[in-house]
Amino acid sequence: MNLWMWLLLSCLLAYAWKLLGYLVPASLLRNPRMSRIAGTMTIGLLASLTVVNAVASGQSLILDARLGALAAAGIALWFRAPFLVVVITGAATAAGLRLLGWD
Amino acid sequence: MKILQSPAVRIGLSISIATGLYGVSFGALSVTSGLDFWQTMALSLLLFSGGSQFAFIGVVAGGGSGVAAMGAATLLGMRNGIYGMQINALLQPRGWRKFAAAQLTIDESTATSTGQTDPDEQKRGFWTAGIGVFVLWNLFTALGAMAGGALGDPKQWGLDGAAVAAFLGLLWPRLKGREPVAIAVVCALATVLAVPFVPPGVPILVAAVVAAGIGWFSHGRSDEGLEPDVDPYAENHVHHHHDPAGDHRGDRTGDDA
């Protein structure tokens, strides 16, 4: 039940961000600093989420099959594979490495 | 009506299919992260912003608390506010349309709309991509959630590797040029350094603070990082992102066939 509460609150806040854009005066749009922070934060958060999902396990750093998935996804993206192919490549690599015994 | 002859509608439809399809991966990853079917659907229906949804389940999967998941998802949603301002200026929706447009304001609908120059096309592009992605994204989320629930051990299928790949896939289109790469590397390092010292989920928020600091103190393109996950105009305008002024994608013409 606790997770439901944070989940619904996240939905509410996500909508609040979106609606805020429609309600603030247009002059704020010309403030480049706000849109720049929104952009750098998007990059920073996605980079952080990538790393956390690749090497973190609770509070420790672990090198396992997920690192192989990261490398394989990078190669797929380099060759301009579409998003869904990238995701499947990541899954297949992690699953394959585990089959080979590298957890 | 020759609605399908509108370039904005056609681009909006193709972006809807491309984006909607990867709702499958969100649905499957969400249920294997520990969310149930309806929690997964609530995220796609109500939160409706791919990056934030993946962030929420990513933090939960890593053992993070609900409040940390909310923090990451909410900070990642800030850019939608910027998109809202752009769409409000272009479309000027009135009454209930304003509230509907707000929910549909995401990377893809904004990029489809701002890529057009004709006001009517901008309008068609926004609504086609917005409604199209919404419908397909939710449909495929449901499909993925049902499939994911039947999979058993997620690790055996490499679904934790799929999550890593998904985040890198979301980050990738935003890494155009040296500066965004530098921001990504610094934030990745800050995350790794923070992991042993703070509870799960919090390192992501540490990275957000670092990224906000970079945005505040440095000067660069004001639309850095505001690229869609699937760029509707990628084939026509490959190098448009390097304009020094960064005037909110106004350089995209979108007059394609």
Image: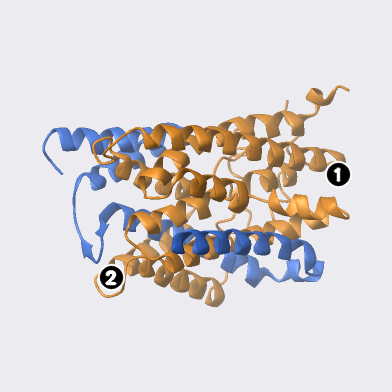
Tell whether B61 sits left or right of A57: right
Q: Secondary structure at mark 1?
A: helix
Q: Amino acid at mark 1?
A: Pro
Q: Residue at x 80, y 42 (%)?
A: B122
Q: How many marks?
A: 2
x then y, percent, for residue B76: 53, 60
x then y, percent, for residue A48: 39, 60
Mark 2 chain: B
x then y, percent, for residue B28: 41, 39
Q: Residue at x 15, y 44 (%)?
A: A103
Which disc, if any, is residue B119?
1
Tell whether B14 sits left or right of B229: right
Tell whether A7 sits left or right of A15: left
Work out whether residue B92 can be spotted. Answer: no
Image position of B215 with respect to A90: above or below: below
| Quadrant in the picture for residue A93 | top left
Q: Residue at x 28, y 42 (%)?
A: A69
Q: Amino acid at mark 2?
A: Leu
Image position of B146 with respect to B72: above or below: above
Q: Residue at x 80, y 56 (%)?
A: B88
Residue projecting furthest to the left: A101
Shade representing chain B: orange
Kindly indicate which chain is depicted in blue in the rendered structure.
A
| Quadrant in the picture for residue B1 | top right
Query: N-terminal of the two: label 2 or label 1?
Result: 1
Badge 2 vs badge 1, beta-carbon distance below 8 Å:
no
Q: CA distance from mark 2 to mark 1?
A: 48 Å
Mark 1 chain: B
Which disc, if any, is residue B193?
2
Q: Secondary structure at mark 2?
A: helix
